[in-house]
Amino acid sequence: MMNPRIEAAFNEQIKFEMESAHLYYQLAGWCAPQGFEGMSRWLLLQKDEELGHAHRFFTHIAARGGLPKIAALAEPKAEIKSALELFREVYRHELLITNRIDVLLDLAHKENDLAGAEFLQWFVREQVEEEEQASRIVLKLERIGPSGAGLVMLDAELGKRGKAA
Ligand code: OFO
């Protein structure tokens, strides 16, 4: 039997994770016509990861006898002016998600939901990685500035994501 407050909060997190996927899908759509195929690939893989995160919550809720719920999603931001603005948006979004995970963990402890707290540990670690990845890309883009050659090189680097070395 799942604690109803935890069930509701975890269901809300399914929506947050799917909104992450929605946002990254949209941002990938901005990259491709700009010639940033590598960034587009990076974002599409991130979109798939986010759907995986949503599914983790889905299976956890269902395994505990709860009802996973799929909510309507907010329309993601599509008006972007630069790759730097785009990855700042990604980083800002990941900070929001980290905050959400912290709130969920706090709730699990308050509700004495040990299974829920244990389940969330994976996300605590994952968010360290998510923030690191996004912040490093922002840092590189800030260093590169508007240089065309630097952007082409970074785009190529990001396009290697998910490919064997
Ligand atoms: Fe689900 O980690 Fe990004 O948002």
Image (spheres, rainbow, N blue to C red):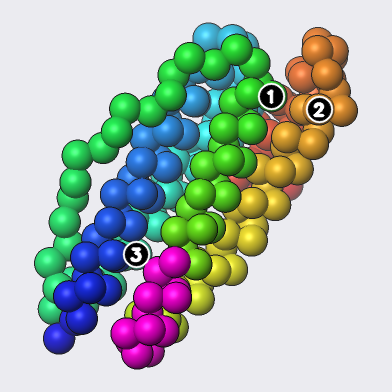
Location of residue 146 by image quarter = top right
Q: Is residue 73 left or right of residue 81?
A: left
- x 44%, y 74%: residue: 105
- x 37%, y 79%: residue: 108
Q: Position of residue 12 (x, y in %)?
A: 28, 56
Identify the element where label 3 is drawn: helix
Q: Tell me if mark 1 has few (under 14), some (14-19) or many (20+) residues whose alpha carbon lies within 10 angstroms of its own.
A: many
**Tag 1 or tag 2, which sits nearer the N-term?**
1
Instruction: Kindly identify the amino acid type of the residue bearing the numbered disc 2.
Output: Glu
**Tag 2 or tag 3, which sits nearer the N-term?**
3
Q: Is residue 115 visible?
A: no
Give the residue number, with chain letter if any, for mark 2: 142
Instruction: Kindly identify the amino acid type of the residue bearing the numbered disc 1.
Output: Leu
Give the residue number, with chain letter if any, for mark 1: 84
Q: Which residues are magenta?
A: 103-115
Q: Is residue 83 visible?
A: yes
